[in-house]
Amino acid sequence: MGCLFVLILLISPRFALFILWIATTMVDRAFDGFIVPLLGLIFLPLTTLGYVLAYQPGPGVSGFGWVVVVFAFLMDLSSFGGAKRYRQA
């Protein structure tokens, strides 16, 4: 099941986050409401997914988890930059 999730993640991070939100309680544990994950699903799907996967009950995100979140954020920013460059050319 894990390999299937990674394949879905590589194809579409928004769909992977949506499946994770529907099938598990991980998103509900990481966020209190539904507004922030919904905005993350729309605007920053990899960052939201990284935060959800790095979140641990109790301490939250710490240590290497923040490296995962920052890397996911940089990947989101690079996708925005690549789309902008593609539209200009």
Image: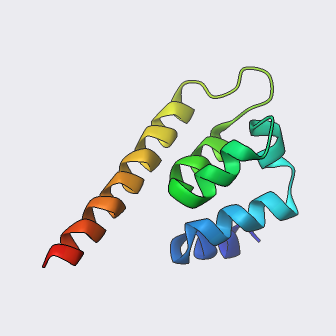
Question: Looking at the picture, how far across and down is residue 42, in whole percent?
Answer: 58, 60
Q: Is residue 20 left or right of residue 36?
A: right
| Residue appearing at x 80%, y 34% in the figure | 32
Q: Quadrant of residue 79?
A: bottom left
| Residue appearing at x 82%, y 38% in the figure | 29
Q: Nearer the viewer, residue 87 or 79?
A: 87
Question: Looking at the picture, how far across and down is residue 31, in whole percent?
Answer: 75, 37
Q: Is residue 23 left or right of residue 3?
A: right
| Residue appearing at x 19%, y 69% in the figure | 85
Q: Nearer the viewer, residue 44 or 30?
A: 44
Q: Quadrant of residue 60?
A: top right
Q: Is residue 5 left or right of residue 26?
A: left
| Residue appearing at x 57%, y 66% in the figure | 13
Q: Quadrant of residue 56?
A: top right
User: Number of labelled discs?
Assistant: 0
The vertical placement of 36 against 76, above or below, is: above
Q: Residue furthest left?
A: 89
Question: Looking at the picture, how far across and down is residue 58, in whole percent?
Answer: 79, 22
The vertical placement of 48 against 60, above or below, is: below
Question: Looking at the picture, how far across and down is residue 73, in whole percent?
Answer: 43, 46
Which quadrant would the N terminus be assigned to in this image?
A: bottom right
The vertical placement of 18 against 60, above or below, is: below
Which quadrant would the C terminus be assigned to in this image?
A: bottom left
Chosen colour scheme: rainbow
Q: Is residue 29 left or right of residue 45?
A: right
